[in-house]
Image: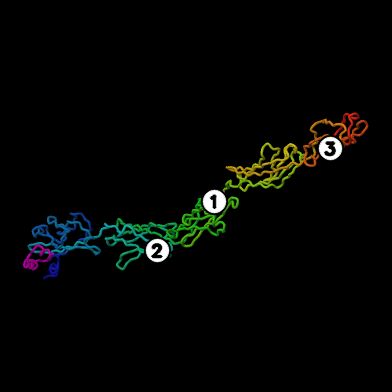
Amino acid sequence: MTMALEGFIRSRNVKWLLYYGLRWKVLFFIIYFSRVSGQIRYSIPEEMKKGSIIGNVAQDLGLDLKRLRAGRARIVTGESVQYTELKTDKGILVVSERIDREQLCGDVTPCSFSFEIILENPMELHRVTVEIIDVNDHPPIFPKNDIKFEISESATLGSRFTLESADDPDVGLNALQNYVLTPNYNFVLKLYVNPDGSKYAEMVLQKPLDREEHPRLSLKLIAIDGGNPQRSGTVNIEITVLDVNDNAPVFNQSVYSATVMENAPKGTYITTVNASDADSGSNGLVTYFFSNLKRNVADIFKIDETTGIICLAGGIDYEKDKKYEVRVEAKDQGGLTDTSKVVIEVTDVNDNAPLMNVMSFSSPLSENSPPGTTVAIINIKDADSERNGQITCSVNINLPFKIKSSLSSYYTLISDVAFDRETTPEYNITITATDSGSPPLSSSRTLHLRISDVNDNAPLFNQSSYSAYVIENNSPGMSIFTVSARDSDWNQNAKISYHLEDTQISGTSVPTYISINSETGVLHALRSFDFEQIKQLNLVVKA
């Protein structure tokens, strides 16, 4: 038995004969009496259309077309799929089924399949091998659409990150040849070859990551084959940069300004401070607190450590402190800090009435004091500010006084007319100070002014002349009559003494007849009168 025949026995055609149920004795008979005349080989690209010519079998085997038809030439194969068909009328071999090299051979190269052409009378067996040449009909394909990394921004330069490989079922130049990474500042691509010839890539960190600048990076890895036309596949690389506490909080203002009304209730909102931290998570969580507060201020304000809201915690008084400056500190969870200043202006409320202080007061005041005489000097202060502290000073109406402002916060009370003690011996002067607040507040002070007397009034008798009767032969020392005068002045100026003028009666001095009590004004007879001698006495009494 020839070597070709032995190959035939080993070939899959035996399986085909068994498949069709031929008996073993028939098989051995065919084998024994057949002869092998030739072997041919064809090379065709995969994916050829049905009916495409593979080769001219008759010509290549040196067979006549009549022999093909007479010998009932046919293809013998044991495969379930027959990729070729023999056209005996033309002696050509054509494609009968789609040939996919990757499906047929996978990674094996070269890729081919073999079959036999058998003829009868006499029996001939010709082996045909068809090599399938790869066509670049597959792009490189990544197993996933995305490759995800979480990389700390503190990763050291030179850190490597292996990327998933793409698969290209094509072979040779049509297979995957290279990887390309989209341009970026942080990573470069390194290409490596495995012992089996496959390729893989790694990203290498060449510039530090900064989460605050780029918290996420989106890159593309492109796998390229060497076919013509060239094919490629792409996978997205999503890099999440993990935070490191490398940023301190930063206030959005170096100085915050706020105002608050004095006497505002506890809990009154003042302002909100805000600091941002470029870090994320707990590294970017900021808390607020006051820094180096004086003891008296620590009880007045409070700050919410989470929101930065500053509120009033105690009472404030404009008259004590008109402005507060406090330092606020923002700290992240890593201990990094920033500070800012908060200036709180206290707005005045008209809660203080004018305060009056009498610096000098002239009482009693002589009634002969001229108009314009200073009666009192008064100092008036109001602890409030601006309009709330602007003072208007007045004196009660219908009094002969007026207020004059001489110096700041000093007021002079002066007389406006001449005094007459005998008409008005004293005055109750009410001075009122009123501020310009809303509503206005006022205070009053009453001064009791006494007018001292000046002897500016002569005594006055009730009558200009008096008449009295005395019976003759009266007793000496008898009270005859009483005269009375009054004086509008006061005290010593109003104390009256009575005197008789030294007049003559019939050549005799009046005081020899009559005497007068200088204090009481009682006239007394000094002798007994005789009607026949003196019928009438005319005398003058001086007060």
Q: Which residue is mark 1?
A: 257
What x and y, as percent, mark residue 38? 15, 64
User: Mark 3 touching mark 2, by CB under 8 A?
Assistant: no
Q: How is the image coloured?
A: rainbow
Specify whether residue 259 is in view. no
Q: Which residue is mark 3?
A: 498
Residue 451 belongs to the span the image colors magenta: no
What x and y, as percent, mark residue 532? 90, 28
In the rendered view, tell whether residue 170 sits above or below residue 468.
below
User: On the picture, is 60 further left or further right than 144?
Assistant: left
Q: Main SS of the magenta segment?
A: helix
Spatial separation of the CA atoms under disc 1 and disc 3: 87 Å
Q: Helix, strand or loop at disc 3?
A: loop
Spatial separation of the CA atoms under disc 3 and disc 2: 136 Å
Magenta stretch bounds: 13-35
Q: Quadrant of the C terminus?
A: top right
Q: Which residue is mark 2?
A: 204
Q: Of the two numbered discs 1 and 3 on the same chain, state the one appearing first in sequence.
A: 1
Q: Helix, strand or loop at disc 1?
A: strand
Mark 3 neighbour density, 10 Å: few (under 14) some (14–19) many (20 or more): some
User: On the picture, is 337 further left or further right than 97?
Assistant: right
Q: Of the two numbered discs 1 and 2 on the same chain, state the one appearing first in sequence.
A: 2
> Residue at position x 58%, y 42% from top?
439
Point out the frontmost of discs 1 and 3: 3
